[in-house]
């Protein structure tokens, strides 16, 4: 993985999660800001798929278990769209809080993918 992209991805996920959690704790239903920030996390993950495919061809192969890395990435890819659908259906603060929790979980998963890639 590319270190600077990993950092940017984690920052985006943490910011999106923080915005959604604060909004949910205030009792706010899902709104454009929280939904779009969660979808920004998904966009970062889609870019990460391209990076993960290209990096081995550029001389930066995974040192850790590739299956474990890809399972983390696929799982992380599925989480934001699922929680956005939930938030659209459940227009309460719980949908907003769920988006915050998923975004923060994805941040942790990105860090774990970085560790797996490095083989540590």
Image (spheres, rainbow, N blue to C red):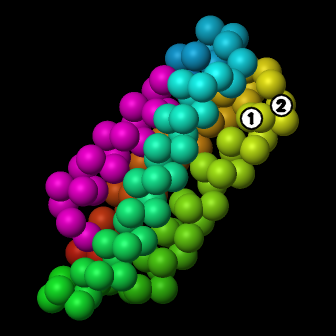
The quadrant in which residue 90 appears is top right
Mark 1 secondary-structure assignment: helix
- Residue 63 at least partly seen: no
Mark 2 secondary-structure assignment: loop
The quadrant in which residue 92 appears is top right
Residue 36 appears at what percent x and percent y? 54, 35
Say left or right for 39 vs 89. Answer: left
Q: Which residues are magenta?
A: 1-20
- Residue 82 at least partly seen: yes
Say left or right for 15 vs 63. Answer: right
Secondary structure mostly seen in magenta is helix
Q: Residue at x 74, y 26 (%)?
A: 94
State the residue in front, 118 or 12. 12
Residue 3 appears at what percent x and percent y? 18, 60
The C terminus sits in image quarter? bottom left
Asked whether the residues under the numbered discs 2 and 1 touch, taking CB atoms below 8 Å apart as contact, a structural biologist would say: yes
Q: Is residue 24 above or below residue 86?
A: above
Residue 17 appears at what percent x and percent y? 49, 33
The quadrant in which residue 87 appears is top right
- Circle 1 packing at 10 Å, graded few (<14), some (14-19), many (20+), is many
| Residue 36 sits inside the magenta stretch | no
- Which of the numbered marks, if any, corresponds to residue 90? 2
- Residue at mark 1: 87
Using the numbered discs, state the Cα–Cα distance from disc 2 to disc 1 in whole angstroms: 5 Å
Q: Residue at x 24, y 50 (%)?
A: 7
- Circle 2 packing at 10 Å, graded few (<14), some (14-19), many (20+), is some
Q: Residue at x 17, y 86 (%)?
A: 58
């Amino acid at each position: 993985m590319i270190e600077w992209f990993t950092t940017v991805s984690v920052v985006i996920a943490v910011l999106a999660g923080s915005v959604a959690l604060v909004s949910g704790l205030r009792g706010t239903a899902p709104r454009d800001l929280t939904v779009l920030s969660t979808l920004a996390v998904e966009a970062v993950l889609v870019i990460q798929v391209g990076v993960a495919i290209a990096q081995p061809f550029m001389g930066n192969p995974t040192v850790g278990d590739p299956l474990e890395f890809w399972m983390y990435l696929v799982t992380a890819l599925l989480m934001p769209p699922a929680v956005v659908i939930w938030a659209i259906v459940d227009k309460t603060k719980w949908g907003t809080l769920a988006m915050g929790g998923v975004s923060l979980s994805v941040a942790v998963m990105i860090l774990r993918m970085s560790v797996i890639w490095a083989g540590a």
